[in-house]
Amino acid sequence: MFIHRVLKPESIRNKRILLSPLNWGMGHVSRCIGLIDQLLKQDNEVFVACSASQQSVFEEYFDDLVYISHDPYPFKFGGKGHFALDLLRRAFQLSRRRKRELDEVKQLVNDFNIDIVIADHRYGFRCLNAYSIFVTHQVTLPVLWYEAPVQWLHRHLLKKFDRIWIMDYQDNRLAGKLSRNTPLHPADYIGPYSRFQLYNLNRDHDEDVVLIASGPEVYAQQLIGEVLKRNKNIVIIASDQINVNGNRAITGWRNQDQFILKTRKIISRSGYSTIMDLCFLQTASELISTPGQREQEYLMLLHKKAP
């Protein structure tokens, strides 16, 4: 089926779409909720390839998706802030998983008669037999000069997609230099996406402060310990696996959403999905970067400087 080369979310209607989010933290799932909601409202049929934990979150928001069990990328955070080293240790397994994923997606496109494939930062989630789109906010990675091969590989893999959707505004106000495109990549700025698009944002703020302990479990636990040193009694939003040290905890994504909607200030990691959420919520915030993650360090400084 022919699809025009320039394709934005709002122009996709009556298509069969296969989508998969990256599994490194739930931020990719969170931002896909807003995108999926839009696609469904435009009379598309959406198939989501994901892990069991990702599916459990999507099921809280949607009852009209088709779920396909799909293996995550093999990665484990060490918890000592050595993100690049953690990545290097898994380089072979990640490359092997990406290559295997290419065959899996080809089979899924054939099995489900897919028109469009959408990968939220999964380099291997594409198919020559379907229009393939890569969703990201990072066209340029925040690497150092001696990590130039990583930048080259990232851009090389992006070129294999038909289109890139950049989740930022044209002026790069949310992601800064990370979302600045180059002429090498056919891309569209599609603006921010958030699960809070699903709610009425005219609400009362009757809670003072909430701590969102998101991201990889080891770093979420570290954040709680850091914040509790100066905030002894605070409401914490976290997964069931996180120890909240006797504080009040809110679990379940829909329950968490209702609490976040009512709070006056959010303390959280400076992940990009959180920054997009704050763009919609317009809530006061304190952002704390994850140790060793240059992207979050850069975003934290960027938004500290913002007016």
Image: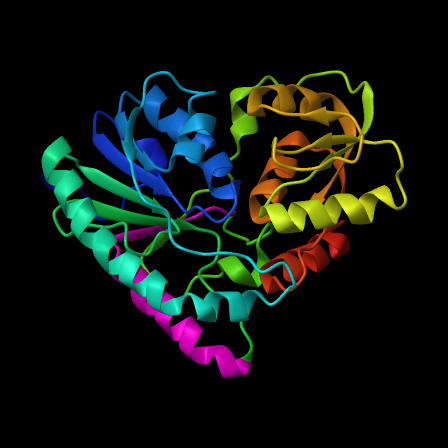
In the drawing, does residue 125 fall left or right of residue 228? left
Residue at 67% across, 17% down: 202
Q: Where 56 sits versus 304, above or below?
A: above
Q: For the view shown, which residue lies furthest in the bottom direction?
A: 146
Residue 270 in picture, x, y percent from top left: 66, 50
Looking at the image, residue 67 sits to the left or right of residue 53; the answer is: left
Camera sees residue 142 = no
Residue 24 percent across, percent down from the top left: 48, 49
* Residue 38 position within the rendered picture, expressed as x and y whole percent measured from the top left: 39, 27
Q: Position of residue 148 (x, y in %)?
A: 46, 79
Q: Is residue 140 visible?
A: yes
Identify the residue shown where x is 47% and y is 46%.
Answer: 167
Report the residue at 61% width, 64% height from top.
Answer: 294
Quadrant location of the N terminus in the rendered image:
top left
Residue 278 falls in image quadrant: top right
114 part of magenta stretch: no
Q: Quarter-wise, where is residue 235 in the image?
A: top right
Give the vertical position of 128 relative to 145 (above or below): above
- What's the magenta region? 145-168
Nearer the observer, 289 or 166: 289
**How many labels sit on residues?**
0
- Colour scheme: rainbow
Observer-nearest residue: 144 or 222?
A: 222
